[in-house]
Amino acid sequence: MKRLAYLLTLLVTFSGQAQLNITIDGGNASALPIAVVDFVNPGSTLATDMAEIIRNDLARSGQFKPLDKSLLIDKPSADADLNFGTWRLLKSDYVSYGDITHLDDNRMEVRFRLASVAEQKQLLALTLPLNKTQARAGAHYIADRIYEEILGIPGVFSTKLAYVTAVKNAADFKYQLIVADSDGYGPQSLVTSKEPLLSPAWSPDGKKLAYVSFEQGNSAIYIQDLSTGSRTLISSFEGINGAPKFSPNGQKLALTLSKSGNPEIYTINIYDRSLTQITNHWGIDTEPEWSPDGTSIFFTSDRGGKPQIYQTNLIDKKAKRVTFEGDYNARASLSPDGKYIAMVHGNNNEYKIALFHRPSNTFQIVSDGNLDETPSFAPNGAMVLYATKTMAGKGLLKAVSTDGQTSNDLVLSSGHVREPSWSPLIK
């Protein structure tokens, strides 16, 4: 319940009005059919449809196929009401159900159950005490628990997305660094600037964001505390200050600096600002990404003639080339287990998101645009978030399952969306 309490706190912290609209494209033929029955809710009405949020979450993952609401003819609220025969006829593998008790004008208790139709047994039972304003966070939490109970890996519906929006205002652009729920709901602007904002990166505990700002003319790297709104200037050397990434222990940032005259990879201790130079080469080295164990850094370099991804061990600082397929591979994002690298893969002036499976040394294209960029792995490794453009040139975000079967368009009603970053799991 400690995790749930933190999720509910985040919901209050990041409340907003405008939001991203999600469209689900494609489908996974092996998606598991599940019936998510509306909660029996006598008495006071609830503005948030918790069952609908759960259905949408599971559908977005590509791993589940929720039954259409019109088929949910039974509405069990307790175990005694559950008729497995009904759900067998509807060819549902699982059924979720429950009820809501309103304790007073503000508080309620949500009782939730998940059952296996084939095994005819209960898999999960939860009782959640919530304020009515926390209904959406509670629904995401339940969807996470369903996902993990059935698939054995954590759900990411309670996580956050960070991204940058650019809206043309008269002759200028207004840039904003935004944090929203994983379904695009409740965006909150953290920073607004007339100058570009770039490269948001989450701390491992999900409580801070590092980013690049040009508000003072030159690039500078800041860390912003999400709960207090305070921010700290980390790096403002002459030249490039770019592409910050938190180390797995949260004590350092890897970043790109050109203070020596050439872009190189450095690490900086966020407490005492001590610098360590990681690369030293005449080529352009940029876009660092930590290995999950923190012992090495992946980065983009043109030292071989064209941009490719390299890896350097932090002990001996010897760099080795990782990617060889295609004219261009850049902007690495590692899966949590380190087995996959998501990247921008370029050939013949087309740039798509590719997955490189390190153990088998194989490539897979998972996006279908011509100018796809800035991939960011979901913290459970099941999806990749990235930025792309519509045929009209408008920037938007997409999330694609790692098997390429399901994708979600996250479209903002006005302006462009870019530079996405998926938060870590909330512990």
Image (cartoon, rainbow, N blue to C red):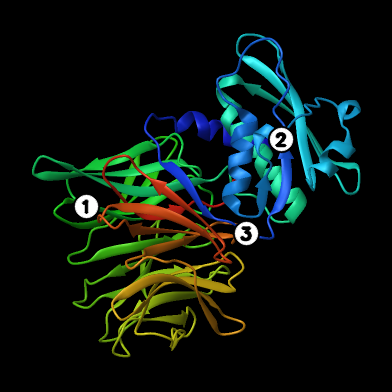
Alpha carbon of mark 3 to alpha carbon of mark 1: how far? 38 Å
Q: Secondary structure at mark 2?
A: helix
For residue 152, above or below residue 170: below
Q: Which residue is mark 2?
A: 71
Alpha carbon of mark 2 to alpha carbon of mark 3: how far? 20 Å
Q: Earlier in the sequence, mark 2 or mark 3?
A: 3
77 or 265, which lies in front? 77
- Quadrant location of residue 157? top right
Residue at image point 8% right, 44% down? 171
Q: Which residue is mark 3?
A: 28
For residue 45, above or below residue 374: above
Is 418 on the left-hand or right-hand side of 403? left
- Residue 287 location (% of width, % of height): 36, 70
- Residue 233 location (% of width, % of height): 29, 50
> Taking the image as drawn, is residue 280 in sight?
yes
Q: Amino acid at mark 1?
A: Pro
Alpha carbon of mark 1 to alpha carbon of mark 2: how far? 48 Å
Neighbor class of circle 2 (other Cα within 10 Å; few <14, some 14-19, many 20+) is few
